[in-house]
Image: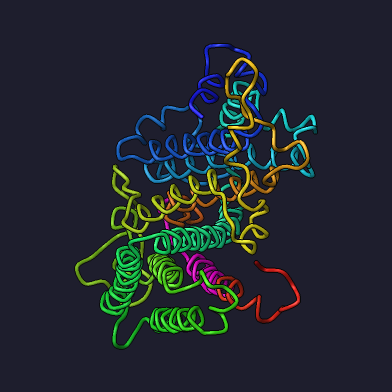
Amino acid sequence: HSSVLASCLCGSASCLLSSCCPSTYNSTISRLAFSFLLLLGTLVSVIMILPGMEENLKKIPGFCMDATSISGQVNCDVIVGYKSVYRMCFAMTCFFFLFSLIMIRVRSSKDPRASIQNGFWFFKFLVLVGITVGAFFIPDGTFNTVWYYFGMVGSFIFIIIQLILLVDFAHSWNQSWLEKAEDGNSKCWYAALLSFTIIHYALAFAAVVLFYVFYTQPSDCTEHKVFISLNLIFCIIASIVAILPKVQEAQPTSGLLQASLISLYTMYVTWSAMTNNPNRQCNPSLLSLIQSSSPTPAPGPASPTPAPANIQWWDAQGIVGLVIFLFCTLYASIRSSNNAQVNKLMQTEEGQGLTTNIEEATSEDGVRRAVDNEEEGVTYSYSFFHFCLCLASLYIMMTLTNWYQPNSNYQFMQTTMPAVWVKISSSWLGLAIYLWTLLAPLVLPDRDFS
């Protein structure tokens, strides 16, 4: 593997301009390379909202003031980081959406467009840089408001995709450790599975307790009480269904490990949703440097005031969201799953795309070379992969700005209830999809879900 990778990354400029790597490894390397571009854009976005960076961003000519779209004085300290992240992520979204369109219906490596997918990296980078530079010249107008709602819709879908990837990861994890338990030292592997399952459930239960303590009030916060209670009930139902005898018979590798991980992720999404409630009585996590805070806040939505010079966008749920995003992005780039239902949802082939039979790929001179296993058909949908990265760009945009948006005169940032409902509804839909993966073989017995 290392010799093939080295040949792809050699000093030859042709590797940057064409598809010089064998196709088998391109299926992985290409996904990793595109994911690297996404992570690079994410890093740039993070840098743009670091405290103190607004002083440098305000030096961009005309970036803070736009007399044609904003009346009155603009609080640049608040808006400049927000605008920068939105434009950076707009550029990444356009870049991946363009490739998603270009790669529609690419069936095999014989398609000329496959070489675009697996090569020409230097030019791809230039295209991304060009779109980014152009994005910073977009006038405000209704752009920020419209793009905010695009971000909400895209993030809703990406949260579902993250849950699907976590289901697949837990499935592969459980299957791998069960196989090792059957090969030998079964007590050790079963104990490890049980330990992680208990840890996941313990963290999820602890989260529920903390939610009731910090995000509810005896005479207020009815929505939060409903959200927490419903998701707790739904997670218990999913856990029970996962170990039903008929479900176990149809899917022997399903179990509490997957259910516990999904329960923990559901509690994270619930927490993330509650941190966007504009009612400070129900949401102690409102960013105090963006919205005003007082020792004894009045009930109801807080009355925001202009922010101080250094804007702090970070909070705990945003950091956790970034960690989950990084994990899911990396896993989506290297995954090779045997879960047929997840493969159908993610438009990938079973257990292909990451490895090849090296022993059968040795040439006469003794040099091992990879074999093109995509001549008859690609191992994953190029178009759908780019669409997922497109949605990931929107998710990053919303996460880095905490789903906040500026008020009508751009004087302060505010959070809204629609963001809360988008996140909560995505958690419900995600749980429904997980339950479907468990019950589908029973509901549709004539179809092959193996």
Residue 195 picture quarter: bottom left
Find the residue positioned furthest to the bottom.
219
Task: Verify whether residue 427 appears in magenta.
Answer: yes
Q: Residue at x 44, y 84 (%)?
A: 233
Which residue sits furthest top? Answer: 12
**Residue placed most toward the observer, 185 or 197:** 185
Q: Position of residue 234 (x, y in %)?
A: 48, 81
The front one of 102 and 154 is: 102
The percent position of residue 385, horizontal first and vertical second, equals 64, 46
**Residue 142 in view (yes/no):** no
In front of the other: 128 or 420: 128
Number of numbered tags placed on the structure image:
0
Q: Compared with residue 100, is residue 224 higher up or lower down, i.e. above or below?
A: below
Residue 236 drawn at (x, y percent): 43, 82
**Relative horizontal placement of residue 362, taking residue 277 as reference (left or right):** right
Q: Residue, x 68% and y 49% (percent of image)?
A: 384
Residue at image point 41% right, 32% down: 58
Answer with left or right where residue 297 lies relative to residue 182.
left
- Prevailing secondary structure class for the magenta stretch in the rendered image: helix
Q: Quadrant of the C terminus?
A: bottom right
**Residue 157 sits in quarter:** bottom right
Is residue 312 rendered magenta in the image?
no
Q: Is residue 204 left or right of residue 443?
A: left
Does any portion of residue 392 appear in the rendered image?
A: yes
Q: What residue range appears in magenta?
A: 411-432
**Color style of the picture:** rainbow
| In the image, residue 43 above or below residue 368 | below
